Image: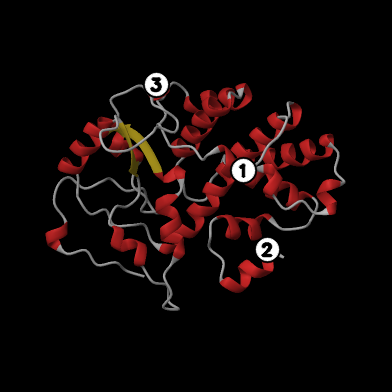
Amino acid sequence: MSIAVSAAEISGEPFDREEPSQLVNLDSYRPYLIDPPEIVPIRPLTGPGSKYVHQHIYFTEPKYLNIRAESGEIDLRYRRLRTLSWSQIVMRRSEEQRLHREKEPTVKPPPEETVEELLKDYFDMDIVGATTLGIQELKKPKPFDPWASRLFAPPEVEALSKAGKIDILGAERDRALEDLNSPRVVSHMLVTSAFKRLASFLGDFTLEKIANERLQEQTHFPLRVPQYGALRTIGHHVILNGVKVRSLEESRLLIQGLQTEVDRVQLAS
């Protein structure tokens, strides 16, 4: 697939690209991140006049949300790439405006083969956060969790003990952490930044230690982090995989909204 960009659309300083993925190099954003990442809100309130905004990392033009696959249908992978939390850096509104003045206004999206692998890396990053939160909440359960009460819980899950659920979550967390030592396409720094932000968001000292060891005195990026509800849903799907009710790949397609209508009916049943 090729995406044509006219000469009129290209002005300003272009973003550096990673090879061979053609993802935007995160270092292109460093001059515009004037706050230490530790003080940048994890999930800031945004709106007219807000101090902080979410800047999309990898591409900008809304028209790219209508990219079509070879079948002629809209390629939903690009839509998900743009909206997922890990594709967004939290930065000051004033700096975002300066970035748009100084950098190319139209950022061409990465090729489809990169997007496919990137979404899988993102899901592994989600799993790290989801399993961390799941283990925390199993060890210190809340009196009532309205979100969890809406999740599909088959007999195989109901039969699990708390220790059994923790074992499943812990094993999948270890698997995701290991795989993210050599991610498919995302940069080492993006993964490390995700770990650092998740550690702050969830108050997890183990994840904090892992992130700090990976950083080696570098400065991480203030990425946006998924909401608690989204992490709880993914953690639940990890347990479904552990009892062999639904595979993680099926769950990924469902959660990322990439399945067909037929798939959606089958997965929901």
In front: mark 3 or mark 2? 2
* Chain-order first, disc 3 or disc 2: 3
* Mark 3: secondary structure: helix
Indicate which disc residue 39 carries: 3
Q: Amino acid at mark 1?
A: Ile
* Mark 1: secondary structure: helix
Q: CA distance from mark 3 to mark 2?
A: 40 Å
Q: Residue at 41% x, 59% y: name it.
A: 78
* Mark 2: secondary structure: helix
Residue for badge 1: 127
Residue for badge 2: 268
The reply to whether residue 96 is in sight is: yes
Number of residues whose C-alpha sits closer than 10 Å to that of mark 1, classed few (under 14), some (14–19) or many (20 or more): many
In this picture, residue 260 sits left or right of residue 8: right
Q: Residue at 58% x, 23% y: name it.
A: 203
Quarter placement of the C terminus: bottom right
Q: CA distance from mark 3 to mark 1?
A: 25 Å
Q: Residue at 63% x, 24% y: name it.
A: 206
Whether residues under marks 3 and 1 lie with C-beta atoms below 8 angstroms apart, the answer is: no
In this picture, residue 57 sits left or right of residue 128: left
**Rendered position, 101 above or below 110:** above
Whether residues under marks 2 and 1 lie with C-beta atoms below 8 angstroms apart, the answer is: no
Q: What is the x, y in percent for residue 15?
A: 26, 46
